[in-house]
Image (tube, helix red, strand yellow):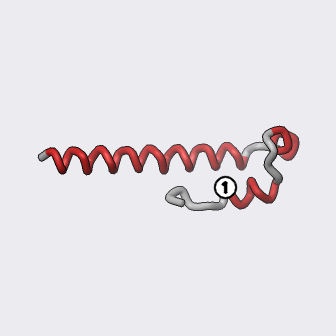
Amino acid sequence: MRRLSAFALCLVGRYDLAVERFRSRRALEDLDERLLRDIGVSFEEASQEYQRPFWD
């Protein structure tokens, strides 16, 4: 039973990570070039990042 609980916790953790990656990449997509420049990211870098799949 403990192994199943540990496995379930691991799955939940991975799901949470995937959701966070998806949300942060979508937020990055919404930034304009001025805001991207403020955080030191080019438009091309941002585009490559938000096109990545959530599991990557």
With 1 as the anchor, is 46 left or right in this view? right
Does 53 sit above or below residue 1? Answer: below
Q: Is residue 35 above or below residue 3?
A: above
Locate residue 24 relative to residue 35 in the image: left or right: left
Kind of residue at badge 1:
Tyr
Hey, which quadrant is residue 24 in on the image?
A: top right
Give coordinates of residue 31: x percent, y percent.
77, 43
Residue nearer the viewer, 43 or 1: 1
The spot of residue 33 in percent (x, y) is 86, 46
Residue at image position (44%, 44%) is: 16
Query: Picture coordinates of residue 12 (x, y %)?
Result: 35, 45
Residue at 79% x, 49% y is 41
Single out the residue that lies furthest toward the left. Answer: 1
Q: Tag 1, which secondary structure? A: helix
Question: In this orientation, which residue lies closer to the viewer: 1 or 33?
Answer: 1
Q: Quadrant of residue 53?
A: bottom right
Residue in the picture at 87% in, 41% down: 34
From the viewer's perspective, tell me whether residue 27 is left or right of residue 37: left
Q: Which residue is mark 1?
A: 50
Count every numbered label the image shows and give the total: 1
